[in-house]
Amino acid sequence: MKTPGTSQAQVTAQWIGGLSGHGSVKGDDFSTGISLPTDFGGRNEGATPEDLLLSALASCYLITFGIILEKNNVSYSDLRITAMLETSTAFPPKVQTVYLNPMITTDADEAMIRGFAERAEAVCLISQAVAGNVIKKVSVKVLPEESETHAPLLATDWLFGEKPNMNIL
């Protein structure tokens, strides 16, 4: 039963085997295969727990950023994100750092956009859930509207080329 003033999400997961096992996870509107990454002795077939965590963080952040922009009447023609997660492989394994690299094409003031980007990280509920356990680094790229950069963003475009310039802990 749902408690008033709350939202609920529910998934069902199934697993067969050990390290090299496989399984699935299903929600109301999605279903995907799951396995461990090869770095941990898994098959890397389907989504890994790291993929799912990173997807949750990136999508929550991007949705929150879009809501903040809308509420502040900021127009933009493109808003996307590239994200990366680093995990230690020593026992016990631990997610160490998440890099969130949003890119926005807008003519709005860059300082204002960077402030909204910080706010999005602070109020994203998935980001709040991992706060204190994972280092999060956000590096915003703001492009003017006349920019021709609307091609798909690759992780290598600037995730690995430049050091994130905004640390959000």
Image (cartoon, rainbow, N blue to C red):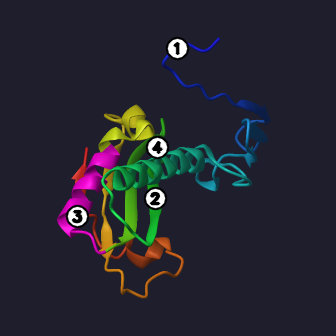
Residue closest to the far right:
16
Estimate the x, y position of residue 90 in percent, counting from the top left.
46, 43
First in residue order: circle 2 vs circle 4:
2
Residue holding disc 4: 90
Residue numbers of the magenta segment: 107-121
Question: Residue 139, located in which quarter of the rendered image?
Answer: bottom left
Q: Is residue 67 left or right of residue 37?
A: left
In this view, the mark in front (2 or 4)? 2
Q: Is residue 103 above or below residue 2?
A: below
Where is mark 1, residue-wise? 4
Going from the N terminus, do you reach mark 1 or mark 4 first? Answer: 1
Q: Which numbered marker is on residue 84?
A: 2
* Residue kind at label 4, given as amino acid type: Ala
Q: Within the image, what quadrant is residue 62 found in?
A: bottom left
Q: Earlier in the sequence, mark 3 or mark 1?
A: 1
Kindly identify the residue that appears in the image at 39 percent across and 63 percent down. 102
Q: Nearer the viewer, mark 3 or mark 1?
A: 1
SS at mark 2? strand
How crowded pointer 3 is (Cα within 10 Å; few <14, some 14-19, many 20+) is rated as: few
**How many neighbours does mark 2 have within 10 angstroms: few (below 14), some (14-19), or many (20 or more)?**
some
